Amino acid sequence: MATDSISLPLPKESSRSVFMDWLCTVDHKKIGIMYIVYALVFLVIMGIEATLMRIQLSRPNNTFLSAEAFNRLFTMHGTTGVFFVAMPILFGFGNYLVPLMIGARDMAFPRLNAFSFWLTAFGGFLLYGSFFAGGPLSQAGSAPDVGWFAYAPLTATAFSAGHSTDYWTIALLVAGIGSIGGAINFVATILCLRCPGMTLNRMPLLAWMNLVMGGLVLVTISPLTAAQIMLMIDRYMSGHFFDPAAGGSVVMWMHFFWIFGHPEVYVLIIPCFAFISEIIPVFSRKAIFGYPAMVAATTGIGFVSLGVWAHHMFTVGMPSYGNAFFVFTTMLVAVPTGIKIFNWLATMWGGKIRFATPMIFCIGFLFQFLIAGLSGVMLADAPFDWQLSNSYFVVAHFHYVIVGGILFAIFAAFYYWFPKMTGRMLSEKLGRWHFWIFLIGFHLTFDFMHVPGLLGMPRRIYTYEPGRGWEIWNLISSIGVIFQAAGILIFVYNMIHSYFKGAVAGNDPWDAWTLEWATTSPPPDYNFAVVPEVRSRRPLWDIKHPQDPDWKYE
Amino acid sequence: MSLGNLLRRAFSFALLQTISCFAAIAQNSPLSPTNIFAPDSTPAHSIFRISTFVLEITGAIFVVVFSLLAYAVIKFRERKGDEEFEPPQVYGSNQMEVAWTILPVLIVVVLFLSTAQVIHRVQDAPPPPDAIQVTVVGHQFWWEYRYPQYGFVAANELHVPVSDPKDPTPTYLRLLSDDVDHSFWVPRLAGKTDLIPNHPNSMWIDPYQTGLFLGQCAQFCGAEHAKMLIRVYVQSRADFDTWVHGQEQPPVSDPTVAAGSALFIAKTCFACHTIRGTIAAGTIGPDLTHLMSRETIASGVLANTPENLRAWIHNPEAFKAGSKMPVIDMTNDELNQITAYLETLR
């Protein structure tokens, strides 16, 4: 009959065609997932590097690792963490979510998107190739050993023979170009591809925050790239940019690096603010409190963060008024950050808090980010910093931000959006085990790590003298690693097991309000069969509450 | 006094007591010679005071915000029977935004102004005319201490006179580097200041008590950064003058170790080390003129005993892999003779 449809059996997908599909894809969802999986692999590798270092530091004058191996490990751990775990995972979530949340079909430049991913991926492979080049693997090969900020003149050929430093330089240069490509995509997509009715004032906070992050990346990567090119010229073309014996300036490297390095950490935290801003409202059953203030605060953070970099250089010998200026700007950037904490608190206030796994990770984030921010205020105080700088207090502070803040927010994002990406729910039970075990490990390691800093222990030392009062705190920090490793293993198992056997998620398992929940889980290639039209910040709330839609109150 | 005032004083008192307790335990206990909260010199004290102020403020903020978060998480949790209704949707409040913007900005202004004062006081302090001047030169991986007022060079163990707070005799340190970045950090005496090639820095200390103060390099400087230890001997004026007098003397010339002294030249030790008044005038390694006046060798890593000295010369790599001192080929006899010679350099 004329209206019968003929269904032909679909051709069986060979594993080669699936492989080629992913290799050549320009679809933002697939690219997002590749970024995330890539980052997770490096997260595990980073964890192994950290475990080895913490074993070495668990006792004074330990001989588990040689000085050379330890120095290469902390360099690789830091470099990997910033460039090949945090950046890719956040670009991955951003890539996946931004088009969906603004009702678009894909990012503005899909091929640039794929190119950026593969550049970043190549950078990581190149960096890790260094382990296998040059020296023996037991001494960690030819991996760079100059610290993740690679201060001059330690990176000069006179002090860094061979090519270990070059692996650092080129891997990051390439990855940086990938980041710029990704950022261009974020900015163009968010500014140009929002669906009808979605003014800037109505787009989800995640979109706003990825917009600020993208803008910040565009400004901040260039100084690093420039510095790396200058370093290569110094090392191979008889340049003297950073050669003090020939009139070059060592301090200039620091300025260039930190003009990149400080906004970079805001690049890392702002997308995490985005996750928190999307998840807390849904599990408090209330709209985000103070949307305009959140936008203003985030933009403010973006701008002010460009003017604080020399707080990494308080001990370098800048004049007193220079130090004072950076004290002021650094403390100032804490103000919009605090405003965000107050707005999240106000969102929960008077709400109806549901302690699903994404929410408990958000709550962990709130407490831990508060502490991390306050230890940052201590470091912003230059005289205090003259004692604390380059000590384990700083290491504890930034791990508190990165693990206690960023990683917890990323875990929240995983539990929240994994159902959308795969169509399956992650196990709540395993999620709770993951949360509590990891929480214990995090606090064991990083709470007590502040103490050796206060007792005079510098960072980047492969061993330490007994009798300084540091032993017990280092031992406790090292024990915490066991719990963190267990937590991560539970998490990885949860993801693999739930991918195959998890409860089917449906379109909208969390009863949420943004556009990604209006399509299937996982979404079809084209995201939305019909281009959505919105009238408020929470289009699905309007649909679910036709008597009481948001657009009446915004 | 008002309740608010009383609470604030109680809070500060509790916080200060906790810190002082910790500092006191640390000071009296031999296990924490590098506690930043046990200051013993004016710069360290200035830092301690402003740090306490910062801790009070951040501590108070922490208590308030933490309590509000904890309260919210408990009070507003979903309860049984609540599932179907949505709570009242509150979109924001301009007054609250203004309030919690202005209050933090005020806190920032107060913190900034008090901090700027301390920065100026510590960094811009002019050296009094009777200050001791020491030029510190950082090397991979040892410390050179030059005393320009007296005309000698020491290494790895810094001697300074104690300073009476009522009539201070501070020591001003000029900080230079021979190779890469280093940082001079003796927590109980001052904050750290970096040694940067071609970028001279300066700092000062005026220790109130005699004794040995420990520290170490605090800017990653290469393979053995961890073993670039600092030892500051604060001495009474009399003891300091005795030490200076000893350092100013020419090296002991003991004819019984002439063989060792000749080997010191033959084995090229002279190329890196200085023994004043002999042809050994190298500046790559520490000045050895009065090596035996030091309690440690290898920048604090080994006790200065004949066995350790011999072992160090025999194979520096075993103690500090990456040290710039090469392994020099010599027989056991030659090693013994060189060690015996160095043992005479009091």
Image: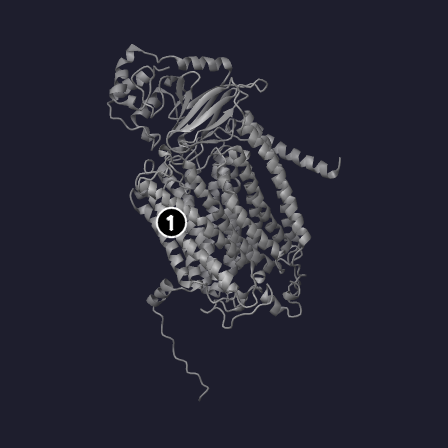
Does residue A23 sit above or below B161 in this rendering? below
The quadrant in which the C terminus of chain B is found is top left
Q: Residue at x 44, y 15 (%)?
A: B243
Given residues B317 and A323, the one toward you in this image is A323
Given residues A457 and A315, the one toward you in this image is A315
Amino acid carrying label 1: it is: Leu
Given residues B33 and A376, the one toward you in this image is A376
Label 1 SS: helix
Residue lying farthest to the top in this orientation? B255
Q: Position of residue B102 (x, y in %)?
A: 65, 46
Residue lying farthest to the right in this orientation? B1
Instruction: Let me know if residue A354 appears in the view.
Output: no
Q: Position of residue B228 (x, y in %)?
A: 41, 29
Q: Chain of mark 1?
A: A
Q: Quadrant of residue A158?
A: top left
Q: Quadrant of residue B52?
A: top right
Total marks drawn? 1
Residue with the mark numbered 1: A173
Q: Residue at x 54, y 26 (%)?
A: B125
Does residue A134 sit above or below A349 in this rendering? above
Residue lying farthest to the bottom in this orientation? A1
Question: Tag 1: Cα neighbours inside 10 Å, few (<14), some, or many (≥20)?
Answer: many
Q: Position of residue B153 (x, y in %)?
A: 39, 20
Q: Residue at x 35, y 13 (%)?
A: B251
The quadrant in which the N terminus of chain B is found is top right
Instruction: Let me know if residue A166 appears in the view.
Output: yes
Q: Position of residue B69 (x, y in %)?
A: 63, 49
Given residues A302 and B233, the one toward you in this image is A302
Q: Is residue A523 left or right of residue B224?
A: right
Q: Quadrant of residue B166?
A: top right
